[in-house]
Amino acid sequence: MTETLQRPTPASDAPPPHPTSSKGWLGQLLLRLHFYAGILVGPFILIAALSGAAYAVTPQIEQVVYDRELHAPVTSTTLPLAEQVEAAEAYAGDDTLVAVRPAPEPEDTTRVMFTGTGLGESETRSVFVDPGTTEIRGDLTTYGTSGALPIRTWVDHLHRNLHLGDAGRLYSELAASWLGVVVLAGAALWVIRYRKARRARRDMVRPNNKVTGYRRIFSWHASIGIWLLVGALFLSATGITWSTYGGANVDKLRAALDWGTPSVDTALTETGGPTATGDHAGHAGHGAAPTTDDAEAPVIEPTTFDEVLGVARSVNVNTGLVQITPPTTADTAWVVQEIQRSWPTEVDSVAINGDTLEVVDRTDFKDFNLAAKLTRWGIDTHMGQQFGLANQIVLVITALGIATMVVFGYLMWWKRRPTRPGALIGKPAAAGALARAPWWGTAAVIVVAAGIGWFLPLLGISLIGFVVVDAIVTATRSRAASR
């Protein structure tokens, strides 16, 4: 057995050197963190990456699969929204009308959206109407503000929660949180190895296919990782905003710093104007009037859709992608909002009194604070909507690259697995690196870990698990060595 472990290893299969002395405690700690996180969280990151790549291309799939629902023959005239809404209401029966999205282009259909039985959270029933003839072109369940159709919704739920509901969201939070940690630890190890590997630096930035075995896999893993560094960190940071616990803390931080996204105030006074305690009350997202049980249900006249849209066009709505939302109570206003998420961002909105057609309130994206703008841009870029096809291509390449790095990581582990005869090539990172660190190093790690654990609780809990496993491994090896 001893001869097997000491047998010389071919140079092509020897791993690049990594810090193992007590002086390199940080490198050893990062290596073990990178290793354990990759092994334990790698499957979650792999699923999130592959499903994210699939989601990025679903808009094109929707256009093909749902061609009849989304498109209609071009006609010389477009009928008023009132007639389109009446046709949809007659078709939908007793379901409640909640919004209308007029056809943005002559070849597109109008979506008339309803609530009804059997719908899940954030779902609506969309009836697709030919704007030239009022023919009903389809009836589908749509999801979220993006208006995702069934195929994209299915992929979205797979990416978000593995179709397991709220409990499944823990998987995506683990993936988003640990992706950033794994990438940053890998980047730090890349810098350490790049500084030491003077003759093989090119292998760190481009794959070297002249070598074989472990070295070839490592070259691909390292070079792909460094090129995808920014993209992977971006996906990690923006993905956290959708998470259960980390996302809640992000929302609290934004609220505390007054970085909320502005929204129109829809509350009406007895005279029809807005209720306000200051200029544009409700722009911080807290000004909407609460719905009461005894509030009078409004009567929605189909002709009002045309009227409020006309007023909105004269105020700040100047894009084809628009949603018109009627009031839910008699003391609230209609809302007309731009929903164009591509560059340049068009998400202006205006609240209008349906009786007097008076403008109650308005928000303009140009007036958003920087944090709100960055949030909007970050979310839309993460979803592949910000820069059109180019955005989608970059997302697919980044996601598939992340998945490839995970696969290469497991292949490297497989090449060096302890149970493989003669596979102990290279010295593994020493356990107990934190115990060998200077006091200030230990204190810094504890402070950083505590801060991250507080802000990202799920990451903090799993990080504690890593520390416990590392401590058990160190104690076990110490006992074995003392015998």
Image (cartoon, rainbow, N blue to C red):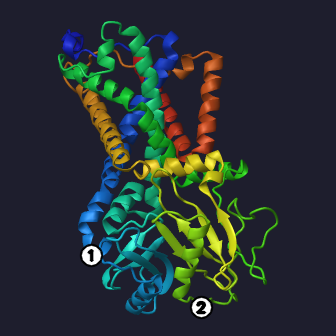
Q: Residue at x 53, y 74 (%)?
A: 324
Helix, strand or loop for disc 1: loop
Instruction: Say few, some or many: other residues with alpha carbon within 10 Å of mark 1 (under 14 / 14 to 19 / 20 or more).
Output: few
Relative vertical location of residue 37 with respect to residue 442 in this rendering, above or below:
below
- Mark count: 2
Give above or below for 358 relative to 376.
below
Across and down, in percent, residue 295 comes to 69, 87
**SS state under label 2:** loop
| Residue in the foreground of this view, choosing between 472 and 104 | 104
Q: In which quadrant is the C terminus drawn?
A: top left
Closer to the camera in the image, 300 or 49: 300
Q: Determine the CA span between mark 1 and mark 2.
A: 33 Å
Compared to 473, does 360 lie above or below?
Answer: below
Residue beneath label 1, please? 73
Task: Note whether residue 160 is visible.
Answer: yes
User: Residue 80 or 71: which is nearer the viewer?
Assistant: 80
Toward the right, the furthest residue is 277
Residue 240 in percent (x, y) is at 51, 47
Q: Are marks 1 and 2 in contact (CB under 8 Å)?
A: no
Which residue is depicted at the point 42% across and 37% down? 231
Which one is nearer the viewer's eye here, 272 or 25? 272
For the N terminus, give its image quadrant.
top left
Residue type pointed to by label 2: Val
Residue type beneath disc 1: Pro
Can I make out residue 265 in this image?
A: no
Q: Which mark is residue 299?
A: 2
For the point 41% across and 85% down, the residue is: 84
